[in-house]
Amino acid sequence: MTNVEHGAGGGRALVVGWFSFPAMGATAGDILARDVVCEWLNEARIPYDVAVAVPFLDGVSLEDVNPHNYSRLVFVCGPFGNGPPITGLLSAFAHCELIGVDVSMLDPIGKWNPFSLLLERDSSRTVAPDLAFAGQSESVPVVGVLKVHHQKEYGHRARHDDANRAIDRMLARTPVARVPIETRLDTNDAGHHSAGQVESLIARMDAVVTTRLHGCVLALKHGVPPIAIDPIAGGAKVRRQCEAIGWELIFTVDELDDDLLLAAMHQALDPQTRERARACADDAIRRLQSVRTAFQDWFTPLPVPFKPGSVPSTDHPAEP
């Protein structure tokens, strides 16, 4: 990230944080705080670059920059202490004015404070609201991901790995927040041990992608459009269920196409598709009434035919 339109030179700042170092646990809050500081620098018309490390790509690398191209070093967000890699960073930029924003000072201010300007989140002298409160990020759809375990009972037709890889490729191309959901209750890593817990989670999704039959059913039940993928070549119970209830976003593993699956996600996120999901569930519930009737009729005793001259039985003795 660089605001090159502001020019370069002796007044240029380098914005750094834990997002500037590999595998140092940079969080969404760090990025939000960073973007707030960059917005402030833009408003003040201060030229700057942002140092990032993999997996972030929207900036420059600390390993590649020339420290002497900068006169200000702005450290944003997170814990800040007198140890590596901070000490190495400060040594490389020792000629720069050091500014700290939204940091948590690990050492007492009176013992160690290398900043020319310190606007800390918390320290031995003060506490302030976290900068992420002021951050802005683009909201994205929330998509539940329900993958069935490998089903050995289908033999060579079972292609769960192929289905799962197709799901992962599609989600990698789609700006959504994915939420893994497991419908199995006896062993559930998320700690969901009731149908209500699972349903409550699914009901809050914008869409679902699933290789589970009940992932599809429970999504539709709550008006959430599912992309159903039958992981069995040729299709099995997932495909049959979708065909039976008239749900169109169903694919079998042997017909998967990445672009087709991506288009299906866009369709699932369309508000009109959500209306069709509700209608599909309503129709399925209506049709289940005949199943209910057939079940209850089986247990209902047939009426005893009346024969002329017979006396109906009674549980009560006749009155005198």
Image: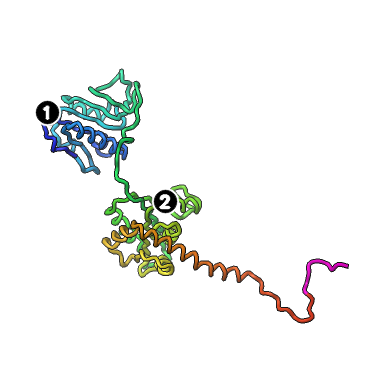
Q: Which mark, residue 18?
A: none
Q: Amino acid at mark 2?
A: Arg
* Left or right placement of residue 268 versus residue 304 in this view: left
- Residue at x 39% of width, y 67% of height: 239
Measuring from the top left, give residue 121's x and y in whole percent.
32, 28
Q: Give the answer, above or below, for where 98 lies relative to 231.
A: above
User: Any magenta on residue 95?
Assistant: no
Q: Which residues are magenta?
A: 312-320
What kind of colouring is applied to the model shown? rainbow
Give me the C-alpha separation between circle 1 and circle 2. 51 Å
Does residue 150 show up? no
Left or right side of 190 for 299: right
- x, y (%) of residue 90? 21, 27
Which residue lies at the image location 70% right of the left edge and 76% below the top edge? 304
Give the amino acid at mark 1: Gly
Looking at the image, tell me whether mark 1 or mark 2 is earlier in sequence order: 1
Screen quadrant of the N terminus: top left
Main structural element of the magenta stretch: helix, strand or loop? Answer: loop
Residue 204 circle label: 2
In the image, is 155 to the left or to the right of 114?
Answer: right
Residue pictured at 40% horizontal, 58% vertical: 148
**Is 283 situated above or below 312?**
above
Considering depth in this image, is 46 or 79 the residue closer to the camera?
A: 46
Residue 318: say if magenta.
yes
Q: Which residue is mark 1?
A: 10
Q: Quadrant of residue 104?
A: top left
SS assignment at label 1: loop
